[in-house]
Structures are given as C-alpha cells and as structure tokens.
Amino acid sequence: MTDKFDTLIARAMTLLDRLEAVLPQPLSAPDWNESIAWRYRKRASGHGVLEPVRHVASIALDDLKEIEPQKEKIQRNTLQFVQGHPANNVLLTGARGTGKSSLVKACLNEYAKQGLRLIEIDKADMVDLPDVIDIVSSRPEKFMVFCDDLSFEEGEPGYKALKSILDGSVAAATPNVLIYATSNRRHLLPEYMKENLTYKHTDDGEVHPGEVVEEKISLSERFGLWVSFYPFSQDEYLHICATWLAHFGVPAAEIEAARPEALVWALERASRSGRVAYQFARDYAGRHHA
C-alpha cells in the first residue's frame, strides 16, 4: 500500500512540474553585468524574460547632425536623470529616419559609465511594463525603458498600461526609471476627420475637444518632454551624407563628387532623412572602397 501511495505522489509531482513549466512564471532579474541594454521578450509559453543585447549600437552623440536643438533637450534631460535630479518621460515624434531612436541609443552610450541602462520593450508587451519596472525598482542603475515606433490602434491593451505607468497609477513613480518612446504620431493613436465633429463651441467662443479627442491627447500629454523632428532640407541631407562618407573613410574630394549620386539616392526613396543618408554612405563606400 505504501509503495502505491509513493508512486501516486511521484506521478503527481511529475504532473505538477510539467504544469509549472507551461504556466507563466514571474519575471526574474537577469545578470545585470552582462550588458548595458536588454530586450523584454515573451516566450511562446507566456514567460517574460529580459535578454541582454550582446552588441549595442556604437553610435555617438557627435555622429548625429542637423538635430542640435533636439539633441540638446534629450541630452540635458538624460543627464539630469543620471545625476539623480528630476527629469521627464520623453516622447520623440516626427519625420521618419531623422534620428529619434539613434539619439536614445547615443545617450545610452554617452552615459552608460555613469550607470545608465536601457530596456527595450515592444508595444505589444506594454501590459507587462509594471512587472519590468518592479524588477529594476531597487537597482542602483538608472533605466530608460525604450519603446521604438510606438503607436496604438483602438482598443489595444498596452495603451491603458502605459497611460497608468506614466501618470495615474496608485503606485508612486519609480525614481530610477523613465520612459523614452519614439513615434511618427504625435498623439500615438489614429486620428479621424469625424472626430473634429466632437469639438464643442461655447457661447464665449471657446473651443473644447470632445471625449474621444481628449482620450487621445491624454496619453501623449503624460510625457513631460515632447521633442519634435522635421524632414531635412537638401543642404542638411547632403551635410549628413558627407559626415557618414567621412566616417567610412571616403576622401574629401570624393565626398564632394558624390553629391549628385546622393541626391539621386534620396529621390529614388522619396526621402531626405538621416537614415537614407547613412544607407547611401554605406553603399557608396562599399562600392568605391571595398
């Protein structure tokens, strides 16, 4: 009888182990010495993990041209944060390829030796943001929680989670965490012409947005610092091309001669952005100096 009971207990324990393996587990802290940047990833089983980024992009603040006002604001806010002074959550919005995400990465490289760290999280995983913040809340480092190309469609659950974390949760803000997000949408949600009909006009001429518009504006307003990026002019684009060509070792005389090719490259892509300039420089340097 005892043997049968022991066998039953062993089988029950095996079954429990299997169930535990497939059920979502609490987020565990990684080895913080492995990297200066991590990605939050959801496994097929539903387990969330923080994976170290083995090769962090080596971009520096000096590499980023023609965005000096934006650079000054982001760098100042990040330095305040690293030094333990009050700082704001940041929303970087505007034209694609103008250096929004590159600026965040450059700040990480600039201040990593002073304890700055980065955790990248996808918008689909924003519902797990409170768990990520709990993991790092007692750490001595300063963490930028970074979401690139952030935007929401109607009804996505991550929207509410982010809104609560930014400002509105019962829990107090964690002093060693800031949210840095980039987006092509200023208000992070799609906007429709029919929403203009919800604006209300009072007798004294004031205009008040309707509830739908208020809801969309409320999320972006919870970011304390807004930084806008704009499309580059032709001269600004060519300056960025020249900077990257020099970075890849192209002689000054060749850089001047490459201007017509750089313009054609931008024309073919219908964009004069920093990303397009960087891609042109890589292509040109690869073809002429391989």
Image (cartoon, grey):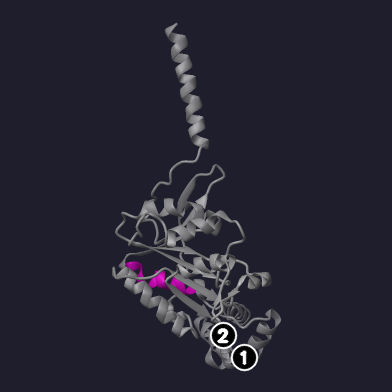
Neighbour tally class for label 2: few under 14, some 14-19, many 20 plus, Cα within 10 Å: many
Above or below for 38 versus 62: above
Residue furthest to the front: 203
Q: Is residue 255 magenta?
A: no
Q: Position of residue 41 (x, y in %)?
A: 51, 52
**Quarter of the C terminus within the rendering:** bottom right
Determine the image quadrant of residue 133: bottom left
Determine the image quadrant of residue 38: bottom left
Residue furthest to the top: 1
Provide the residue span drawn in magenta: 102-113
Is residue 150 among what the camera can see?
no
Above or below for 34 versus 85: above
Q: Say what secondary structure mark 2 lies in.
A: helix
Residue at 63% in and 86% down: 262
Residue at 68% in and 86% down: 264
Of residues 170 and 186, the one nearer the viewer is 170
Neighbour tally class for label 1: few under 14, some 14-19, many 20 plus, Cα within 10 Å: some
Determine the image quadrant of residue 136: bottom left
Disc 2 designates what residue?
241
Residue 259, labelled with which disc?
1
Number of numbered discs overlaid on the protein picture = 2
Of residues 101 and 261, the one nearer the viewer is 101
